[in-house]
Image (cartoon, grey):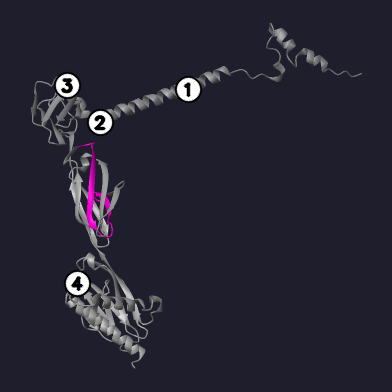
Amino acid sequence: MASQPGAALRLLLLISGLRAGLLQQGRSSSLHGSSENFAIADSFYEQLPSSGERQNLETENVTVVEGEVATISCRVKNNDDSVIQLLNPNRQTIYFRDFRPLKDSRFQLVNFSSSELRVSLTNVSIHDEGRYFCQLYTDPPQEAYTTITVLIPPNNLVIDVQKDTYVEGEEVEMNCTAMASKPAAAIRWYKGSQELEGGKTEVEAMDNKMFRVRSQISVTVLKEDDEVPFVCLVDHPAVKDLETRQYIDVQYKPVVMVSVVYPQGLTREGEALELTCRTVGKPRPDKVTWVRVDDDLPEHVLIEDEKLFISSLNKTDNGTYRCEASNSVGSSSADYTLYVYDTRAAEEGPLGVDHAVIGGVVAVVVFAMLCLLIILGRYFARHKGTYFTHEAKGADDAADADTAIINAEGGQNSCEEKKEYFI
């Protein structure tokens, strides 16, 4: 009678042969007893020890991007030439030792030895995802499983906007949708290189373990945003630097700048003046005009396109000259104030102004010194002769000189009081 381990091995070989035969014949319904055979196999596999009892058999999980290659490795420590087998999630034998019963040419043997069975699976799809089993026919048999996780990068990354052209100050609402990804993608927004905050994200689960992600953001556009890309960037473990861009056409009213072409300095009588008006706007300004604020333009002014020219300046040309530009969005203007110097004042230039300032400062200093001298003089004059001797104290109110002498301290009365008599 055969030993129990030998009987178990023969039973395993029989089950594997039955499975291979069923797969090769396409599970034909004419094969009698096929369901019973699979029931026997499932009953036997249920009796295999749990992963906590494994000692020699090792494997690890595999994560792969759809369309790439997944490699499954069943490794054995201290193998005693026991048979190694790899099964798919449906418990169908992929490889029994170095033999492949499963008719799927995507599975290829990479390495087979007494210590390892390594198999590659090319062109992986979402349907290949699941738990694969490594089995070792020892006494008792051992089993370990590895999980293949398939990553699917998002496709059809698209930004939707309500319209193509906006006016400065308008609010733009943009939506970015990442279709059919696994796991769900994370979406970030950028304006140029600046990351934008405030996006609202919705995640929708699809039927085949995949997700549709939609992110919405609202931005108030400025003229600086014209032709600047708004970027929808996807963060996903299956792909790097996946993004799509949307350029916004921003229209804005003209920006006007007036500059002096000639002269580069003071504007003197008899000299020429040339001004130019630079305008930037979208659409391009269709009308540029020159006016003089609060007055008519001089008759001798020459205007050509965006330039204003006066061949010979005089004081009657003084005033504020304004360049106005407009387009379909709005209008703007910029001013230049003209002051014409006479020839002599112009020649003195800033130096004459400096002399006047210096002269004014000197005059203030001299005036301050005179005031100080007057105050000191009045002070000394007021206090002159107010110092009295001790003897004259009390004589201020006397009617005449004699009375003053009599009333003063040290006068005759005092002398009488101080007399001494000798006998």
Pointer 2 local density, CA inside 10 Å: few below 14, some 14–19, many at least 20: few
Residue 68 numbered mark, or none: none
Q: Which of marks 2 and 1 precedes in the sequence?
A: 2
Residue plotted at (16% across, 77% down): 25
**Is residue 371 left or right of 297 when viewed as pictured?**
right
Q: CA distance from mark 4 to mark 2?
A: 86 Å
Asked whether residue 144 is in view, the answer is yes
Residue placed most toward the observer, 319 or 22: 22
Q: Which residue is mark 2?
A: 350
For the point 39% across and 24% down, which residue is it?
364
- Say if the magenta span includes residue 386: no
Taking the image as drawn, is residue 102 in sight? no
Label 1, on which residue? Answer: 373
Pointer 3 residue: 315
Q: Amino acid at mark 3?
A: Lys
Labels 1, 2: front one: 2
Disc nearer the start of the sequence (4/2): 4
Disc 4, SS: loop
Can you give x and y, in whole percent of width and height, for residue 153 in the image?
A: 23, 60
Q: Nearer the viewer, residue 108 or 208?
A: 208
Residue 158's spot in the image, x, y percent? 19, 51
- Seen at 25% across and 79% down, the residue is 118
- In the picture of the structure, the residue carrying the numbered disc 4 is 122
The magenta segment is: 167-194
Q: Would you call the spot at circle 4 few (<14 residues within 10 Å), some (14-19), or many (20 or more)?
A: some
89 relative position to 385: left or right: left
Give the secondary structure at mark 2.
helix
Q: Amino acid at mark 4?
A: Thr
The answer to which of 263 and 422 lies nearer the viewer is 263
Q: Horizontal and vertical percent for residue 278? A: 15, 35
